[in-house]
Image: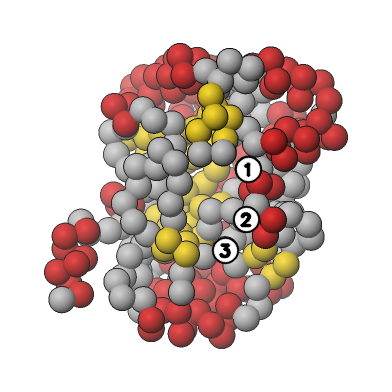
Amino acid sequence: MFNIVRASLCTCLPKYNINPYLGRCAHNCIYCYAVKFPSFTGPVIPRLRLKEEISRMVKKARMRLPVMLSDSTDPYQPLERNYEITRRCIEVLANNCFPILIVTKSDLVIRDINVLKKTPTVVSMTITTTRSDVASIIEPNAPEPNARFHALKRVVDENIPAVVRIDPIIPSVNSDINDLERIVSKSSEIGVKQVTASTMKMTKNLLSAIRRENPGLSRRLIDLYRDGEWIGGYKYLNIDLRRSILSRLKSIVEDYGLMFATCREGFPDLNTTICDGTAYCRKTLDDLFMAEK
């Protein structure tokens, strides 16, 4: 059966989730929170059995909730070019009329546009900076920001709703307001519908990993998060600092005419839509329940 997504401070409606790959995502982003979970550490492991199991999982699902790919590893990381596990999953989901939520930072998603067009789909592309020098530090093995914008343009040109996720915002790293506005501006030009934003949530394992890769950054983060709070196993920035960053970004996003949402921040008053983009691909839960009766 699919995993059902649940998290502290989450404001999303229920949905299913599939991770086609286990282990540490090959993009090797320094901020990856998934290192908190044993299943998402170590080498990348393709879940080859999913290519056969996905049909059985779909048949057993009681409701056609949106299915997110994925919450802990990128469904379009490099190994997907060869294994095509994600492609097989979305083929089965599309053929069975499940809405699909793609969350990625890879331009490989455009390979599967022909499949994604078969069912209500939203593509959320994580773009944390427009600066290649910054991206190379915090997302060393991921496609460059420009490649992601080009992929989003292809997605939008095919009339697939698109969301940009500025997630996470790391103070002193990618929090410059001018860079954030450049992300929003480019997103608006492309035709993206919404921006979803989130500040970096720390875990003990994450801080240790950053310390090994970038000792200077780890010291800055310790100072920045010193007066934060623990929520659901994550260390959050000070609430006033979080709200200040996200409120300024919301103002910019609205100036460009886009919808805005925060993700697991505890500020539902800042949201003008649902953070995961399902507003563009799903009926209300009441409608879904009625359809299954």
For label 1, the SS is helix
- The x and y percentages for residue 237 are 55, 22
Residue at 41%, 79% in the rendered image: 58
The residue under the point 39% across, 67% down is 117
Three-letter amino acid code of the residue under disc 3: Asn
In the image, residue 114 above or below residue 35? below
**Residue of label 3:** 19
Please state which amino acid type lies under the numbered disc 2: Thr
Give the quarter of the figure containing the C terminus.
bottom left
Q: Position of residue 32 (x, y in %)?
A: 66, 43
The Cα atoms of the two marked residues, 2 and 3, are separated by 6 Å
Whether residue 69 is situated above or below residue 85 in the rendered picture: above
Residue 165 sits above or below residue 96 on the image: above
The residue lying at 50 percent from left, 79 percent from top is: 54
Measuring from the top left, give residue 95's x and y in whole percent: 38, 79
Using the numbered discs, state the Cα–Cα distance from disc 3 to disc 1 in whole angstroms.
Answer: 15 Å
Amino acid type at circle 1 is: Tyr
> Mark 2 touching mark 3, by CB under 8 A?
yes
Residue 267 occupies quadrant = top left
The numbered mark at residue 73 is 2
Rate crowding at label 1 as few (under 14), some (14 to 19) or many (20 or more) other CA atoms within 10 Å: some
Q: Residues within 10 Å of mark 3 (few under 14, many from 20)?
A: many
Q: Earlier in the sequence, mark 2 or mark 3?
A: 3
Disc number at residue 103? none
SS class of the residue under badge 3?
loop
- Foreground residue, 175 or 287? 287
Rendered residue at 28%/33% (across/down): 272
Asked if one can make out residue 249 in the rendered structure from this viewpoint, the answer is: no
